[in-house]
Amino acid sequence: MIERMTVVLPEPMAAQLRAAVEAGEYASTSDAMRDAVRLWSERHRLRDLETERLQLAWDAGKASGRHGTLDFEELRREARSRLTAQDNESDRAG
């Protein structure tokens, strides 16, 4: 089923659509508009997926139990210690 719609675009956008059709990228401005709507729909779908992943990560972080004030100097010391340990393992293996 196809529904006919009227779409009003600013002249620069309309010119882009016409140019795409003239260049052979699309058979018609309707094809170009359908592609634009497909891309818009896909962008929204991906945004919704990303929001869902972020919510899951947030929930996992909250459930991890680690909370409170963070001591960034301590975090840096821990990270440096892990990197040093990895470097030492690489030196022994190499």
Image (tube, rainbow, N blue to C red):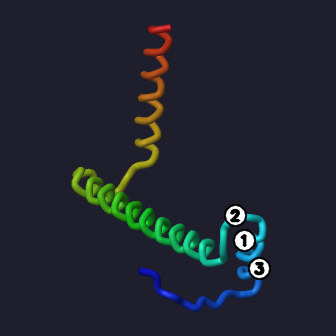
Q: Which element carries disc 2, helix, strand or loop?
A: loop
List the residue tagged with mark 2.
25
Question: Marks 3 and 1: in contact by CB < 8 Å?
Answer: no
Q: Residues within 10 Å of mark 1 (few under 14, many from 20)?
A: some
Give residue 88's position: percent from left, percent from top.
46, 16
| Residue closest to the eye, 67 or 63 | 63
Q: Which element carries disc 1, helix, strand or loop?
A: helix
Q: Is residue 85 above or below residue 71?
A: above
First in sequence: mark 3 vs mark 2: 3
Q: Which mark is residue 21?
A: 1
Amino acid on which the number 2 mark rests in the picture: Glu
Q: Is residue 36 above or below residue 84?
A: below
Give residue 23's position: percent from left, percent from top.
77, 65
Q: Residues within 10 Å of mark 2 (few under 14, many from 20)?
A: few
User: Residue at 37% across / 52% down in the picture?
Assistant: 70
Amino acid on which the number 3 mark rests in the picture: Ala
Q: Is residue 60 above or below residue 27?
A: above
| Residue closest to the eye, 46 or 36 | 36
User: Residue at 61% across / 78% down in the picture?
Assistant: 30
Rendered-image quadrant of the N terminus: bottom left
First in sequence: mark 1 vs mark 3: 3
**How far is mark 2 from mark 1, CA to CA?**
6 Å
List the residue tagged with mark 3.
15
Amino acid on which the number 1 mark rests in the picture: Val
User: Residue at 42% across / 66% down in the picture?
Assistant: 45
> Could you tell whether 52 is left or right of 5 in the image?
left
**How far is mark 1 from mark 3, CA to CA?**
10 Å
